[in-house]
Image (spheres, grey):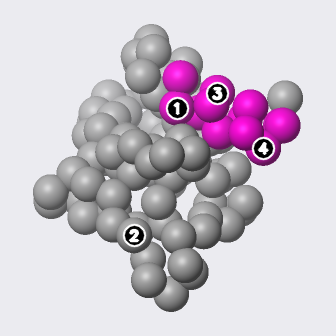
Amino acid sequence: MGGLLAAYHLSGGDSLFLEKAQELGDRILPTFETESGLPLSLVNLALREGVPDGDNYGFVSTAEASTLQLEFRYLAYLTDEDAYWEKAEHVSTLLEIQ
């Protein structure tokens, strides 16, 4: 998603990149539907659902969660969609990154 958002910015606002970033964001959003609100590490993009990673015992790395929150904040800014902002804000609150 970050690459699509960067391409949108660098292209001067080519809407195709933003549309694809938003489509991808919508497919990733369900990964945040966890007890903690931190996103799962894996996602089935076709089914639009998060997938627990058996290799990490249910944990998510700080880097994964932090990167996603930056991308979702920018996507929220560009699209004015509250759902993206709310997921990112919750991650920031949990990680105390403000």
Mark 3 touches mark 1? (CB < 8 Å) = yes
- In primary-sequence order, the first of circles 2 and 4 is 2
Name of the residue lying farthest toward the left: 47
Element marked by disc 4: helix
In the image, residue 37 sits, relative to residue 1, either above or below, namely above
Circle 3 sits on which residue? 89
Q: In the figure, residue 83 lies in which quadrant?
A: top left
Q: In this view, does 17 lie to the left or right of 82?
A: left
- In primary-sequence order, the first of circles 3 and 2 is 2
Assess whether residue 69 is covered by the magenta stretch: no
Residue 26: image location, x then y, percent: 30, 38
Q: Which quarter of the rendered picture does the C terminus lie within?
A: top right
Amino acid type, label 1:
Lys
For label 3, count other residues whose C-alpha is less than 10 Å away and answer few (under 14), some (14-19) or many (20+): some
Amino acid type, label 4:
Leu
Q: Is residue 46 left or right of residue 54?
A: left
Residue 28: image location, x then y, percent: 36, 49
In the image, residue 42 sits, relative to residue 98, either above or below, namely below
Q: Nearer the viewer, mark 3 or mark 2?
A: 2
Mark carried by residue 95? 4
Write the start and end of the magenta stretch as one range: 86-97
Residue 94: image location, x then y, percent: 73, 39
